[in-house]
Image: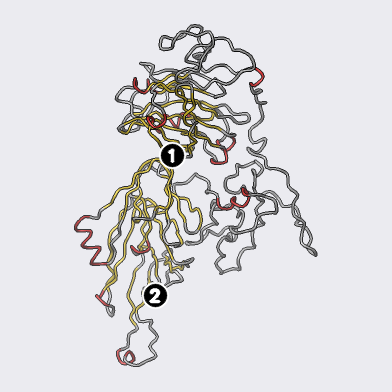
């Protein structure tokens, strides 16, 4: 019985089968879409150092034929023969991919899979659907990789570019496009190849091929390496070509909308707005989709909009005012978290507000307390607070990031020590900590000062150092903070939704509530201690404040919480 894999599952090949001559079948289809299904033979650095191991429609086999493309057969859109014990020592990974040829997106595909067949028996299958993807045009489906022994991993990772972008990602070069050959290697050969046993009177399942299916009548003898043909009655009809975006990927059952409460008029029809998260532009919502409610009215002039409410037209969202999770910046709000789905909508509708936000950016807030970083974008590592990872997808490595002896001494003396881990690889990492509100601040050559306690993660390209704030009237005679400069993103955490204020000569903030400020601001410690009054009861407790000065454009960030 085949083992069903989910995305991210891994296993040794020896635990799946004792054989090394394997059949790999891939099924992927979508209305009006054409796919290029390929196999990349990568070295120890996961690079295509030898383009002879890029097996695709125009190069159907590797030099020693350890990787062969067999074509469509046995219900698979494409199939491969992989002989593990013949793969050269320089090849450490076989990555099976699919990319859209022409217009289209991976969100339009129907149910698909990759499967491994050994000895005529299917041993593992990983299934996926278009609802797991968004605007990606390519898909890394599954990998064979060498880690002391050969293993298999269900990857299921989308890729924004097509086949050319995948080739560049693996270090290959895109040559001038040539006309495709008129004929590919046929799935069924007239004579049996040398590696296969001679045909028998009744063709048995091949040692590495797809499992035989019971035909309606006795089949004709077939080559031993190919899967037995299916009867004509079971052959699926060729899908009718449809224009892109002509229909949703999955259509849910029709349900009668709930009637309006007594005494209330039904909702008037709404004009179509921007698509909600996970919905392709120009398409109707999929199964369980909800029509987003109308956008709330803008807040009065001078008042900060509430969380989830868009600022007035022409006004940029202030720092700390994140859009609702799953909603791209500038997009109309989608279903409200916690909102009761329509009666009869089912489980898919109930989970719709909590689905992963769409890709397209390196840092993407999933909600107020959860941030996702795509390590595949930007090509640089991320430094995050130790223990802040809540889940990850893809191949990600976590290692300890030490500050060095001098850094530990400075951190302990100033209270600005950060226990960090280094995140590298290809995949997405989700970060959170104790339910704190998270805010992504992108720096473009400028700087910001943040206490180490309020930093969750940042790009490794950013420069950071401890900055001293001189002053009198406080223990130690000074305050310390972390200063970040350069180009990259720093994730700041706050207790509650913060407020951002411009710096004026009369701007004061409590040192226990301040979160961050622009590094160009001048900070002065203001002490209101009166020795004579301090000895008497009734003291206000507000003894140490920070006064900020600076040119127009400087800002401070204050949280509604005192540390």
Secondary structure under badge 1? loop
Q: How is the image coloured?
A: secondary structure
* Image position of 425 (left or right of 417): right
For residue 205, side relative to residue 517 (left or right): right
Q: Which label sits on residue 510? A: 2
Front position in the image: 149 or 364:
149
> To which quarter of the image does residue 41 belong?
top left
Describe the element under mark 2 as helix, strand or loop: strand
Q: Nearer the viewer, residue 395 or 556?
A: 395
Q: How far across and how far down the image is residue 351, in percent?
A: 59, 51
Residue drawn 42% across the image and 67% down it: 556
Q: Would you place residue 168 above or below residue 255 in this image?
A: above
Which quadrant, please, contains the C terminus? bottom left
Q: Give the residue displayed 54% in from the left and 24% down from the top.
A: 76
Q: Quadrant of residue 473?
A: bottom left
Q: Residue placed farthest to the top in the image? A: 191
Q: Residues within 10 Å of mark 2 (few under 14, many from 20)?
A: some
> Which callout, 1 or 2, points at the residue further toward the start of the chain?
1
The reply to whether the C-beta atoms of the residues labelled 1 and 2 are less than 8 Å apart is: no
Instruction: Say how many tags the image has.
Output: 2
- Residue that mark 1 sits on: 9
* Residue positioned 55% across, 29% down in the render: 28
How would you rate the neighbour count of disc 1 (Cα within 10 Å): few for under 14, some for 14-19, many for 20 or more? some
Q: Is residue 551 above or below residue 462?
A: below
Q: CA distance from mark 1 to mark 2?
A: 49 Å
Question: Picture quarter containing residue 63?
Answer: top left
Q: Nearer the viewer, residue 299 or 420?
A: 420
């Amino acid at each position: 019985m085949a083992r069903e894999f989910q995305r991210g599952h891994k296993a040794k090949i020896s635990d799946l089968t004792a054989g090394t001559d394997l059949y790999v079948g891939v099924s992927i289809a979508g209305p009006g879409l054409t796919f290029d299904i390929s196999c990349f033979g990568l070295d120890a650095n996961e690079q295509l150092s030898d383009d002879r191991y890029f097996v695709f429609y125009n190069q159907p086999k590797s030099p020693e034929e350890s990787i062969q493309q067999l074509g469509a057969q046995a219900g698979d859109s494409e199939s491969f023969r992989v002989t593990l014990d013949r793969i050269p020592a320089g090849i450490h990974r076989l990555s099976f991919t699919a990319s859209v040829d022409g217009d289209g997106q991976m969100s339009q595909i129907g149910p698909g899979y990759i499967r491994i067949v050994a000895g005529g028996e299917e041993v593992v299958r990983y299934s996926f659907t278009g609802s797991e993807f968004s605007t990606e045009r390519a898909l890394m489906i599954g990998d064979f990789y060498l880690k002391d022994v050969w293993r298999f991993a269900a990857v299921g990772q989308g890729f924004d570019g097509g086949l050319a972008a995948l080739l560049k990602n693996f270090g290959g070069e895109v040559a001038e496009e040539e006309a495709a050959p008129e004929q590919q290697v046929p799935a069924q050969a007239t004579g049996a190849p040398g590696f296969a046993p001679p045909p028998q009177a009744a063709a048995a399942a091949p040692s590495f091929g797809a499992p035989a299916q019971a035909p309606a009548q006795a089949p004709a003898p077939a080559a031993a390496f190919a899967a037995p043909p299916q009867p004509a009655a079971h052959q699926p009809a060729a899908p009718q070509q449809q224009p892109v975006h002509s229909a949703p990927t999955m259509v849910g059952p029709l349900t009668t909308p709930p009637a309006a409460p007594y005494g209330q008029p039904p909702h008037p029809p709404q004009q179509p707005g921007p698509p909600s998260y996970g919905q392709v532009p120009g398409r109707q919502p999929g199964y369980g989709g909800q029509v987003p409610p109308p956008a709330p009215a803008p807040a009065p002039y001078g008042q900060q909009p509430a969380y989830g409410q868009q600022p007035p037209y022409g006004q940029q969202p202030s720092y700390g005012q994140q859009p609702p999770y799953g909603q791209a910046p500038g997009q109309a709000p989608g279903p409200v978290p916690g909102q009761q789905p329509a009666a009869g909508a089912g489980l898919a509708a109930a989970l719709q507000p909590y689905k992963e936000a769409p890709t397209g950016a390196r840092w993407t807030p999933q909600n107020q307390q959860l941030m996702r970083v795509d390590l595949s974008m930007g090509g640089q590592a991320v430094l995050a607070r130790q223990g802040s990872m809540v889940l990850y997808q893809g191949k990600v490595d976590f290692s300890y990031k030490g500050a060095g002896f001098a850094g530990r001494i400075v951190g302990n003396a100033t209270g600005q020590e950060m226990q960090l881990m280094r995140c590298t690889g290809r995949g997405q990492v989700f970060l959170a900590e104790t339910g704190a509100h998270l805010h992504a601040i992108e720096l473009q050559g400028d700087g910001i000062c943040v206490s180490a306690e309020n930093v969750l993660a940042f790009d490794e390209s950013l420069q950071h150092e401890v900055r001293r704030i001189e002053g009198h009237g406080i223990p130690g005679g000074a305050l310390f903070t972390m200063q970040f400069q350069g180009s990259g993103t720093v994730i700041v955490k706050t207790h509650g939704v913060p407020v951002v204020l411009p710096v004026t000569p009369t701007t004061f903030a409590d040192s226990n509530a301040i979160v961050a400020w622009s590094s160009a601001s001048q900070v002065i410690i203001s002490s209101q201690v009166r020795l004579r009054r301090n000895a008497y009861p009734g003291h206000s407790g507000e003894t140490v404040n920070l006064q900020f000065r600076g040119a127009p454009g400087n800002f401070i960030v204050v949280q509604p919480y005192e540390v």
